[in-house]
Image (cartoon, rainbow, N blue to C red):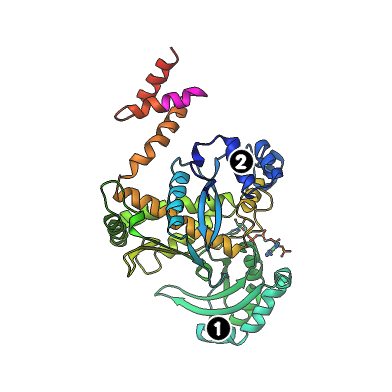
Amino acid sequence: MKNPFEKYYKKSKNEKLTILEEQNYLTRKEIKQITQQVGLTEEVASHMIENQITLYNLPFGIAPNFLINDKEYVIPMVTEEPSVIAAASNAAKLIKQAGGFTTFQPKRYMVGEVALQNCPNPKQAIQAIKKEANKLVELANLAYPSIVKRGGGAIELSVKELKNQEDNFIVVYLTVDTCEAMGANMLNTMLEALVVPLEELTGGQRLMAILSNFAVQSLASAKCQIPCELLAKGAITGEEVRDNIIQATNFAKMDIYRATTHNKGIMNGIDAIVIATGNDWRAIEAGCHAYASHTGQYQPMTNWTKAKNGDLVGTITLPLAVGTVGGSIGIHPGAQLAHSLLDKPSASQLAQIIACVGLGQNLAAVKALVTDGIQKGHMQLQAKSLAIAVGATGEEISQLTSALLKEKGFNQALATQILKDLRK
Ligand code: NDP
């Protein structure tokens, strides 16, 4: 069967939308909404934040061809960076040919902490908290009964002492099943409810009670396996591309300069879908980078290895505590549209989809780096951005873009001059 998304990027916006409707990714009503307005209204925005003065728009695009656990997805992505969606689509198409992504998320809990200081007897404090752990979990649940009704709620509580020469803290960690929500506010409400009982039990004082974004109880993983023949690029054999992709990861494991950029490329994709789906991208950024350093050395977020049969195998595991409800998800029409495009996944499914986007984005970037170099694929999109930046409009944009691409290199002065000549 012909792939409906073949050369999708070359189609007009109407054609693009028609394909999404024909392929049942969006309803007629949603398509109509897109042609009118999917962004926030001034009215809603004014209630979302303090001192709102206007709206700030970003492009919303899709990356098709993501085959995840045998299901086809088009990925909603909100990004200002020209090459992100092209790269994600490219990698997804390649991985689809190889059988797609497989994913898993064994559990999905959030953890929050209450930090106590000045406990007169830390050992006794720990014993007292351990003894009352079940009661404290019950108290946390009483503070947010609706999540218990939904089948979630606080599950367990643990305690430890953290100390150095100057300081000593008793830290209580609460693990909560937040169901479909990311759960920050839920956790914070539950944790606040534990502060006074904990102070009474320990004789210590509250320092703080807050959710943790180190969401290691919400790890989501994705994997793909690609035969070498799909990796060949021009004169470079598939085996060479495979080996260099593996070497690129090995290099990133040893060089923090590279690991940081390697991971930035992964977050290009992850942030774009996290923003599109109305989730808190700062929370995801913080968690992913912290997890990248959980061994004590900042590491690449993906791993590429050689399978026994010679295929290239890619894996990613990240803390992805995203929600399908709560925060701005229900308020932002763009977020609603993104969830529809993804066929309204559960929070756990969404996390797994996001992991695939990160892995695909990384494959695209590293493959480009070890073959053509990153700039070749970026040129077209950069030339277009530059054309717009120097003031080209309408037809001028494609005329100036083509003219710039014929040059050996381009910059703002050259673009301005060519635009001036075009207008003569
Ligand atoms: P909300 O405070 O919006 O809580 C989730 C809401 O979703 C609740 O009102 C809940 O209803 C409702 N809901 C409906 N269906 C479900 C379901 N199936 N499962 C779970 N909840 C459901 O959001 P969160 O607690 O998720 O907090 C996320 C927000 O907190 C984000 O905006 C984030 O930016 C922000 N935040 C993040 C912090 C951080 O990351 N460190 C810190 C502080 C805030 P009901 O109440 O009836 O159960």
> In the picture, which quadrant includes the C terminus?
top left
Which residue of the protein is positioned furthest toward the front in this rendering? Answer: 1
Horizontal placement of 7 versus 47: left or right?
left
The residue wearing badge 2 is: 17
Q: Is residue 325 magenta?
A: no
Residue drawn at (63%, 79%), measured in percent from left and top? 200
CB of mark 2 near ligand 1 (< 8 Å): no
Nearer-N-terminus badge (1/2): 2
Residue 412 in sight from this viewpoint: no
Residue at x 53% of width, y 36% of height: 11
Residue 288: image location, x then y, percent: 46, 61
Q: Is residue 166 visible?
A: yes
Q: Quadrant of residue 191?
A: bottom right
Type of residue at label 2? Leu
Q: Which residues are magenta?
A: 392-401
Q: Secondary structure at mark 2?
A: helix
The image quadrant where one finds ligand 1 is bottom right
Q: Residue at x 66, y 66 (%)?
A: 189
Residue 73 drawn at (x, y percent): 55, 54
Secondary element type, mark 1: helix
Q: Position of residue 301 (x, y in %)?
A: 40, 61
**In front of the other: 207 or 276:** 276
Q: CA distance from mark 1 to mark 2?
A: 61 Å
Q: Is mark 1 within 8 Å of ligand 1?
A: no
- Indicate the amino acid at tag 1: Ala
